[in-house]
Image: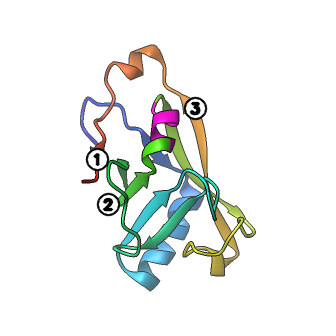
Amino acid sequence: METKDKISRLSVTDEAMEVIWELEKKHGELMFYQAGGCCEGTQPQCFEKGGYFPRMNDAMIGTINGFEFWIDRDLFEYWKYSHFTLDVLEGWGPGGFSLETPLGKTFKVHYRLFTAEELENLEPVKRSE
């Protein structure tokens, strides 16, 4: 969600963007979901669009290359004052549900707290119903 005078909650590294382009070529439209625990811990997961359905009141904090990035509702409450930067690492994460796993890669998020000035002008989040 790039809004002209608003502060984005989400960005992506060049390395992660290269993997996303590769996944898009192979799988078509994508989506991201970051759960609050369980099987994959809090690691961001990439699915084919519609391959995962956000739960009621989960938060969509932005888009990457037009693909929605959803956060578990409880995890969002914990991290709502933070900027997310999607990155990618060599190797496998704690599971194998995400589309980048067969490439020998795993997505990771780096967080930083927003400044007081940024907090006053954040992009809104979309909530699932």
Q: State the residue at coordinates (73%, 66%).
A: 90
Compared to residue 34, the image places residue 113 above or below, namely above
Residue 69 in the magenta stretch? The answer is no
**Magenta-colored segment: predominant secondary structure:** helix
Would residue 83 be seen by someone viewing this image from the given angle?
yes
State how far apart marks 2 and 1 are (Cα): 17 Å
Query: Foreground mark, 3 or 1?
Result: 1
| Residue linked to disc 3 | 112
Mark before the other along the chain sequence, 3 or 1: 3
| Residue linked to disc 1 | 127
Q: State the residue at coordinates (51%, 35%).
A: 79
Tell me if 52 is positioned left or right of 85 in this view: left
Tell me if 72 is positioned left or right of 125 in this view: right
Mark before the other along the chain sequence, 2 or 1: 2
State how far apart marks 3 and 1 are (Cα): 22 Å
Please tell me how crowded label 3 is: few (under 14), some (14-19), or many (20+) other residues with Cα within 10 Å.
few
Residue 94 screen position, x and y as percent: 72, 65
